Amino acid sequence: MTEFATYPSLKDLPVLITGGASGIGAATVEAFARQGAKVGFVDFDETAAQTLLARLAPLNAQIAFAACDLRDLDNMKAAFAEIKARIGAPLVLVNNAARDDRHGWEDVTPDYWDERMNTNLRHQFFAIQALAPGMIAAGQGSIINLGSISWMLSMGGMPAYTTAKAAIQGLTKSFAADLGKHHIRVNCIAPGWIMTERQKALWLTPEAEAAYREKQILPELIDPVYLANMVLFLASADSAMCTAQTFIVDGGMV
């Protein structure tokens, strides 16, 4: 197992991760827990969340979970309040939650479009709006928004998803400008094809893997831990002068 960096600035730091029960989110919850941070996460998959909590129990870390459907903003605010009561006001927000469901442009209805925006974009804005005041009061904070390289590669078959993910870069730069005077940094991470269990189950065919390996510069497929490692860096004091940027973790696709 590769030995990764330890960041002293993350110890005891209150962190909130959306969509933390599985995939990149679960890897991020574990990574912060291993750093000694106070980790809160929300997700609507309570079964996956309890499985994660059981797996991480040997770490004896301070981890708080609240069930939450981020499409319901009142539910989101209540879940955030529960997390705050348990770990303190978060000084790191990882806006991770998303779903890359495939869909044809011909079949998109106004209701489906709105639901996709609520799933992949809207909650990022309102999560920042909810937590930024606490960061302002503390005089510090790091907000990390998860985007995607899908729109950069002109991928088809999911136009509502790629539209939402493209918008996250604009959201990031706008908030970075507004919050920088409060010593709050806002950055975006654009992942490539990350080998989560969902991706393996739904789309990792031998043909898809061969085609991806041909395009990706580095030969290995990307484990979620490498996204989590970039999140750790952007949350830590080591990245103190990094803001309004998009960091691509894709093995050399873009």
Image (cartoon, rainbow, N blue to C red):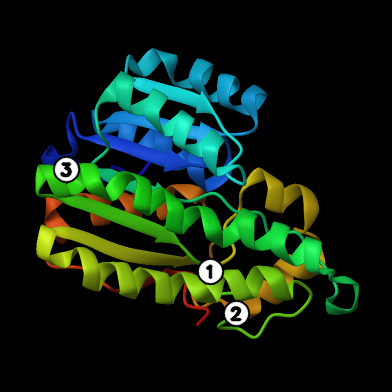
Tell me if mark 2 has few (under 14), some (14-19) or many (20+) residues whose alpha carbon lies within 10 angstroms of its own. some
> What numbered label is drawn on residue 148?
1
> Residue at 38% across / 66% down in the picture?
188
Q: Which residue is mark 3?
A: 7
How far is mark 1 from mark 2, CA to CA?
Answer: 7 Å
Residue 66 placed where, x, y %?
A: 50, 25
Q: Residue at x 51, y 74 (%)?
A: 167
Q: Is residue 105 left or right of residue 226?
A: right
Three-letter code, disc 3: Tyr
Which x, y percent locates residue 74?
53, 38
Q: Does the rendering let one see residue 221?
A: no
Q: What type is the residue that disc 2 sits on?
A: Trp
User: Quick one: 212 or 10, which is closer to the camera?
Assistant: 10
Residue 101 higher or lower than 49, as above or below:
below
The alpha-carbon separation of the residues under discs 3 and 2 comes to 32 Å
Side (left or right) of 178 relative to 215: left
Q: Secondary structure at mark 2?
A: loop
Location of residue 179 by image quarter: bottom left
- For marks 3 and 2, the one nearer the N-term is 3
Per the model, the C-alpha gap separating discs 1 and 3 is 26 Å
> Can you give x and y, in whole percent of width and height, for residue 198 in the image?
70, 47
Extreme-front residue of the structure? 74
Please determine whether, in this image, residue 168 is positioned above or below residue 138: below
Of the residues shown, which amino acid type is indicated by label 1? Ser
Q: Secondary structure at mark 1?
A: loop
| Label number found at residue 151 | 2
Give the mark nearest the N terminus, 1 or 3. Answer: 3
Residue nearest the viewer, comparing 26 with 131: 131
Kindly check if marks 1 and 2 are in contact, taking CB atoms under 8 A apart as contact. yes
Q: Residue at 26% of width from left, 56% of height from top?
A: 234
